[in-house]
Amino acid sequence: MNKKILEALTPLGVPVKFQKHFGAATQYITFHEYFQTGEAYEDDEESLTGRYLQVDIWSKTDYEVLVIQVKLQMKNAGFTRIDEADLYEPDTGIYHKALRYYYLEEREG
């Protein structure tokens, strides 16, 4: 799943990292999977897996254009947006947009 997310978001030209970012960039993206569950079963075997993930956009400046680009890239990669929230981290002065997504994955074998 990480590879699929990286392929979708890396073309945006800002650092994209799994869970944590270390560096001096004033705008970057992190992501993580927060829930995974069986969504359908065939012959007592899981046939579809629901994967729930969060994409976080961090920025010291206006991130509106980047948010639009992330939404488009994720949609084109097959992810369905569930919800989003605008946040602010007062200890660091960073604006934070949290976007939550759902992806339905077929199980192999």
Image (tube, grey):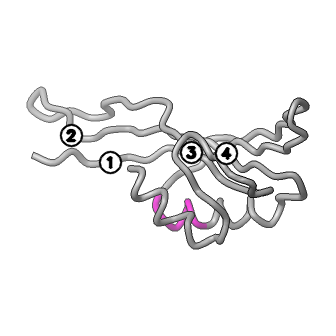
Position of residue 72 measured from the top left corner of the image (x, y, whole percent): 63, 66
The single residue placed furthest to the front in the displayed view is: 23
Q: Which residues are magenta?
A: 73-78
In terms of secondary structure, where does tag 2 sit? strand
Query: In the image, what residue type sits under mark 3?
Result: Phe
Residue with the mark numbered 4: 56
Q: Nearer the viewer, mark 3 or mark 1?
A: 3
**N-term-proximal mark, 4 vs 2:** 2
Considering depth in this image, is 93 or 86 the residue closer to the camera? 93
Residue assigned mark 3 = 31
Amino acid type, callout 2: Ser
Res. 47 mark: 2
Residue at 85% over, 34% down: 89
Residue 39 part of the magenta segment:
no
Which type of secondary structure does the marked residue at label 1 adopt? strand
The mark that comes first in sequence, 1 or 2, is: 2
The residue tagged 1 is 105
Local packing at callout 4 (Cα closer than 10 Å; few below 14, some 14-19, many 20+) is: many
For marks 3 and 1 on the same chain, the one whose residue lies earlier in the sequence: 3
Residues marked 4 and 3 touching at CB (< 8 Å):
yes
- Tell me the distance, in whole angstroms, between the alpha carbons under discs 1 and 4: 22 Å
